[in-house]
Structure formats: C-alpha cells, structure tokens
Image (cartoon, grey):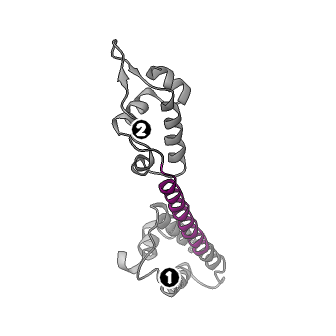
Amino acid sequence: MKIGELARHSGLAASKIRFYEASGLLAPVRRGANGYRQYPPAALQVLEIITSAQRCGFTLDEIRALLPQSGSRPWRQDELLASLRRKVGEIERLQQRLADNRQRLLAIIGSIEEQPADVSCATNLERVLQQVRASEAGDGCAAAPARQGPSAPMARTEALAGACSEGASAAGVAAHARPRGER
C-alpha cells in the first residue's frame, strides 16, 4: 500500500510515517517504478505498536530496541516482558513521587490554613517555611532532593504564597521557598 493509504488506515500523518522509517522504527520499504513507497500490510501493525508503546511512555529508542528488524530478528518475548516490567516499575516510582509531593503540598496547605489570627503575614510565612524545612530534613529531601518536574517548585511556591493572606510578593516567597542549596 502507498503511504497515503497507510496514513489513512493508521491515523498518522505521512510525514510521521516517513520519520519512523528514517528513524529505523519502520523497516525500509521498496519503491515502485514510479518512486512511491510500497508498504506491506505488516507496516500497519508496526505503526500501531509504535503509537501504543509511545502512549504507554516508551521512548523511540526503547521501542526501536524491541522491534524486530526487517525479519532478521524475531520477536524476543523475554526482552519484551523485561522491558514492559521495567516500564511498570518506572511508573510505580513516578506514582510514589507524585503521592509524596501531594502529601507535602497538603501539609503546607494545612499549615497555611492553621495561621493563628494574631500572627502577622511575615511571621506565618517563616513558621510555614520552618515546618517545610523540618519536614524535608526529616526525609532527606534537603540533602538530596528527589527529581521533580518543572511544575513541582512552582506549585510549592504558589502554595507558600498563600501563607501570607496579606499578599507578599511572589518573588519574595519564591526566594524563601527554594531549598537552601538553591538560594
């Protein structure tokens, strides 16, 4: 089948199919006398595997390592299962980090909401920051911060900004919210 037909059946753009071929994910195909690529029916299955694996979090390099290469190497069930299990492990570690971050943020929210009525904004901010520092020191975060996505520090800064109901500047809060090693 020609690339346009393969694109229609797979739901992918022709340029993406050419990219996968150039990247070594899709086996090179023969060209007809007219110069058009002629894809075998199995190419549709490979494209489905590639897109499904990407949705599951596999990188193109990981996918390339698992795909049989133009019939020279058959599917290796043991390698496939090991790779799938590794990806499940990565997901579980990510879920744990997210759950830990969620708990930290909920604790910060709780600390902010417990602001005594007679405490000033600046004093409350320092109180919350001391609790955050103590918590991070207790679980080793201050010495070796867990790898976080780019939104995690921003979320913590925004949560800490709420420690001051009088509206402290975001820049001032952000400076205090960073772990000591990043100031």
Q: Percent x, y for residue 77?
A: 52, 52
- Residue 139 vertical placement versus 102 (above, below): below
* 9 or 134: nearer the viewer: 9
Task: Please say whether residue 153 is visible from this viewpoint.
Answer: yes
- Of labels 1 and 2, the one closer to you: 2
Amino acid type indicated by mark 2: Gly
Task: Please say whether residue 165 is visible from this viewpoint.
Answer: no
Q: Quadrant of the C terminus?
A: bottom left
In space, the residues marked 1 and 2 are separated at their CA atoms by: 53 Å
- Which residue position is annotated with label 1? 136
* 175 or 168: nearer the viewer: 175
Label 1 secondary element: helix
- Residue 34 vertical placement versus 168 (above, below): above
* 78 or 165: nearer the viewer: 78
Residue 143 forms part of the magenta stretch = no
Q: Residues at badges 1 and 2 in contact (C-beta under 8 Å)?
A: no
Q: How many marks?
A: 2
Q: Residue at x 51, y 84 (%)?
A: 139
**Splitting the image into 4 quarters, where does residue 178 fall?**
bottom left
Q: Residues within 10 Å of mark 1 (few under 14, many from 20)?
A: some
- Which residue position is annotated with label 2? 71
Residue 4 vs residue 119: left or right?
A: left
Q: Percent x, y for residue 120?
A: 57, 82
First of labels 1, 2 by sequence position: 2
- Residue 71 vertical placement versus 148 (above, below): above
- Residue 30 vertical placement versus 54 (above, below): above
Q: Residues within 10 Å of mark 2 (few under 14, many from 20)?
A: few
Identify the disc placed on residue 43.
Answer: none
Q: Which residues are magenta?
A: 76-105
Amino acid type indicated by mark 1: Glu
> Quick one: which residue is furthest to the top in this view?
34
